[in-house]
Amino acid sequence: MNTDDSSWWPMGDGVLCNAASQTYPSCNTFTHALSFFNKIEGSQATARQTAELLRSVISQQRVPYTNQAGALIDAVKAIGEQLIAANPVELAVGNIVRRVLHIIREEDLSLTTAAIGGLNLSAVSDDENDDDRDGDSTLSAAAVAAAARSTLRPPSLQTLLEDTPVSAAVPQTSSSGGDSEGKSKFSFTAADKSSRSRKLKHDVIEAVNELIQDIVTCHEQIAEQAVEHIHQNEVILTLGSSRTVLEFLFAAKEKKRSFRVFVAEGAPRYQGHLLAKELVARGLQTTLITDSAVFAMISRVNMVIVGAHAVMANGGVIAPVGMNLVALAAQKHAVPFVVLAGSHKLCPLYPHNPEVLLNELRSPSELLDFGEFSDCMDFGSGSGSPLLHVVNPAFDYVPPKLVSLFITDAGGHNPSYMYRLIADYYSADDLVVQRRATAGN
Amino acid sequence: MDSRRSSRAVIDPKVRQVGFFTSAPLPPDRTQSDPPDPIRSPPLADASSPGNSLSPVMIPPPRHPSDSLLRLPHSPSDAFPPPSPTTTTTSLGDFSDDVTAASSPPPAAARVRGRGSSVKQQGAASSFPGGGFEVPPSVKAPSSVPASGLTTVSVVKLPPGISENAGGSVSVEVQSDRALNSKPLKEKTSKAERRAIQEAQRAAKAAAKAEGIKTPAVTALANAKSAKSTKPSPQRNDSAVVVAASEKKGGDRSVEKDRKKDVPHPRMQYDDKSRVQKLKKRSVVKPTEARNRVELFRHLPQYEHGTQLPVLQSKFFQLDTLHPAVYKVGLQYLSGDICGGNARCIAMLQAFQEAIRDYSTPPAKTLSRDLTAKISSYVSFLIDCRPLSVSMGNAIRFLKSQIAKIPISLSESEAKATLHSDIERFINEKIILADRVIVKHAVTKIRDGDVLLTYGSSSAVEMILQHAHELGKQFRVVIVDSRPKHEGKLLLRRLVRKGLSCTYTHINAISYIMHEVTRVFLGASSVLSNGTVYSRVGTACVAMVAYGFHIPVLVCCEAYKFHERVQLDSICSNELGDPDSISKVPGREDINHLDGWDKSENLQLLNLIYDATPSDYVSLIITDYGMIPPTSVPVIVREYGRGQLWIYEECDPLASPGRCSDAVFFVDGLIFYPSQHLVLSFWFPDRPPSGLNNDLLERSDNFVTVAENGNFTNFEL
């Protein structure tokens, strides 16, 4: 498994002051926003801002003649590491960083492929360029691309099928391999350098723009599928508030489906109130229930549609607290449990003890007023541990077996397929964003 | 009363003669000091033997005589006093009693320990044609009531066995059987003779046992409380027990009939327009219907909340039909000052007590009818304030049956006094005492190092936790709470004050916190006869998650809250709370998205009060009859129905033997007669013992506590 716990864990706020973030002042504020104030709410906004930040990083990065992709990757990693460290629970940040890295690799690869294609066409003239390779200049561009792709992605059934027999000769880099292998192989020195470097940066920025666009429009793409899942007179239950769910329900409503929505309020944040208000504003029949009534009501519900905080590679879901309760109740009553997630929420990591490690304990003041119990606690006794603990976790982990369906902007998928879908978006080299110890500060 | 008590002998029927041992001679016992009732049971009365005869009976562990009585606490939250030897304990022997290996009779051996003395007692069985026996006041002698049953009855009087020094107690042993009936015993047999008889009897018994025959016998263990030598209080003195043999046939039929009648009435369905209209006409409160009603719950009353209280308060002086106490309780329900099944039930009963005290029968009316009508009007007022809980429904049913049972001959003041004490007893036995028994059971399930999770605030669970803490057990409590009532906060406050280590969280975090939990204790508003636990909304969620984590779920519920109704979901019957309390979050002014929610047609707020936990999620139900699996609930419901009829029976069994079919409470072959301090064990030849089924007996170490005027007797199974 390619996950590394340390990549999620806070590394201390000291990293904020290092050189990289001084280079990019916006990074600093963003990191602050992520870590201290939680100013950015919701993974979509976070993802978008992360992508924008990385775009500016890329555009400001000076690219050397050699190994441009490597330079970009290093720069993005340096920033990404801090961003992830600032709020390790917000997995969308890491996802976007990895996706940008993946974009750089892909763009670099496609440029390389094009270049090789061009080389092959002009046959002998640039022969020396291939010196550093094994010397098989007749290797087709397609084979190179396939080989390269196999370095970007973990080995899988699909890559095996795609591979031409020729490319079997190309050594496959292991998925856990270092980040330098892929790029060293394709870091060309001989092609028209200045134009290619500009082209690479340009292409990368273009692709990041597309990514941002995808993030922004993921709601619409998910909502387009609503009519395929919601029929007339359906009763739908949801918990808390999610923009994706909101748009999804609206889309079905606009298609003249009439249905009824139960909204569990989602204590202690009570975002369900917000959702209920918006649904009512659009004319949907809405009933707000308390979270404790979920089990009571779910027997009358046809489908549970919820948003997610993140989707892990095993198909498990990190979701607002209380979701596991809903999922269990839905399973008990054989109600489909559908999770809507934009692709920026797909996380390539496999969770380990996510209830604890991917959770966040929020302030107890959301449950009990400070001082409310001060009168009945004896602080003077000094027996060590206090009598009263208040636990207020922010997230729940829903294991994949409780999820019936994921609906992403790439369509509907089974939980067991999520690892594959996720592999399309990320390069295996980037799962560990943390730079090498030598490269670190 | 104490003096009477202390003189009471203890019955320990470990050895019992079963079957038709007509030839068995009577054990020569000590001459009884009181002559047998000359009329009814002349021949059979025999004096009990002095305890020096070492019979192979079970010897109960000596109890230290003590006069200190267990006082019933008047609030259920009182600390549960640890069981002490002062408690009068009557143990009903079990089949596997190690002590009585040789001699205990197959069906049921009962061991009754008296408070003042520890007595070894010997049971003698009598089988009578009539199957009925009665114990006249002074002498417990079975009457020779002719009856057709095969029931055998043995009335056992305890000799002041080992501890003969308990001089005050005189036990009388009476044996009756057909032969004896025809051939009455001489009142005075010589000591030697009696001795011989006793020996022979013992031999016969041993033989019977060897054969392993379960001989039909109804063994009545009569407490020697009638304590002939001392002056028994007159009212108790005439206590007598009759088990009419005819009850078996005729009684069964009537039971069948009763059972048909017992099918619960269909609930009021509020989507039935005509009935709602009718109801409104009668109603005092005149609630306004909520505007945004939840479609799914049209069948439940959905009224505007908060409007009734001021209206009612203003009406106070106009409502002359209502007793002020009832009125007060109604307002307390309405405002939510009293909540929780037990508290509401007790408040209601006490209000009724006051109302009955101030009641006087109008001219040309009979008390039982008029009072019933009166109570009904009170009840409908209370329903207007807040729908009844199952516990209250059961209590009302009990009260009405008590009123109906009052004989016309009784004067008004007597009737009122009777009802008053009936209600008092219901509160004591069914609620307060039951809770203590539950606590006693439940603490055995708490071990050091446990992490106990509870949801909301249940009075029974709170008592359990506190008692376990007082016992010095080391455990931690997780209190899970939910909106909108946040009852857990109150519980948290009380527990933290007592020094328990608590963790507080909300219901959404249940999956997070469940990892560290080892036991889940839940309260219940009611347990329905399909094992469904009807409780505060959210209980089902907690039980479900615990089930998912393979953590045992223990539900604590007094047996008076059991109901024969069945329910599969939480929709068909429920209660709806004030929707406004959902739209606002106290202390969180930032959450105001739903201000003015009632203006929009499409939005409903649903504030469910209860939900139904499927029985799959429940590992154990702890009740005053012991710890039972959810599948045994219907058995309790069935037996409780009978027991309820009986427990409060003031009727003189002699006067109306037929009633005693109701008056008997069966627990696996045991008949409890607490009001007479009698424990009867019985065995019908052609019918397996009714009552709690065998698996129950095997599963749990039951004991049943029977209270009488503040004194308890524990019947251990």
Image (cartoon, grey):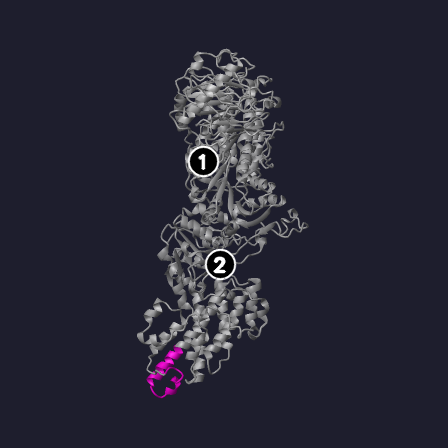
Q: What stretch of residues is rendered in magenta?
A: A110-134
**Residue receiving disc 1:** B698
Residue B156 on image: x %, y %: 50, 21
The answer to whether B297 appears left or right of B591 in the picture is: left
Q: Is residue B369 visible?
A: no
Q: Which mark is residue A205?
A: none
Tags 2 and 1 on a common chain? no
**Residue receiving disc 2:** A354
Nearest to the eye among marks 2 and 1: give it. Answer: 1
Residue A195 on image: x %, y %: 43, 83
Q: Residues within 10 Å of mark 1 (few under 14, many from 20)?
A: few
Residue B695 on image: x %, y %: 43, 35
Chain of residue at mark 1: B
Q: Is residue B94 above or below residue A390?
A: above
Q: Residue furthest bottom?
A: A125
Of residues B306 and B416, which is closer to you in this image?
Answer: B416
Q: Secondary structure at mark 2?
A: helix
**Amino acid carrying mark 2 in the image:** Pro
Residue A127 drawn in magenta: yes
Residue B21 drawn in magenta: no
The answer to whether B657 appears left or right of B592 in the picture is: left
**What's the residue at 58%, 63% (across, down)?**
A36
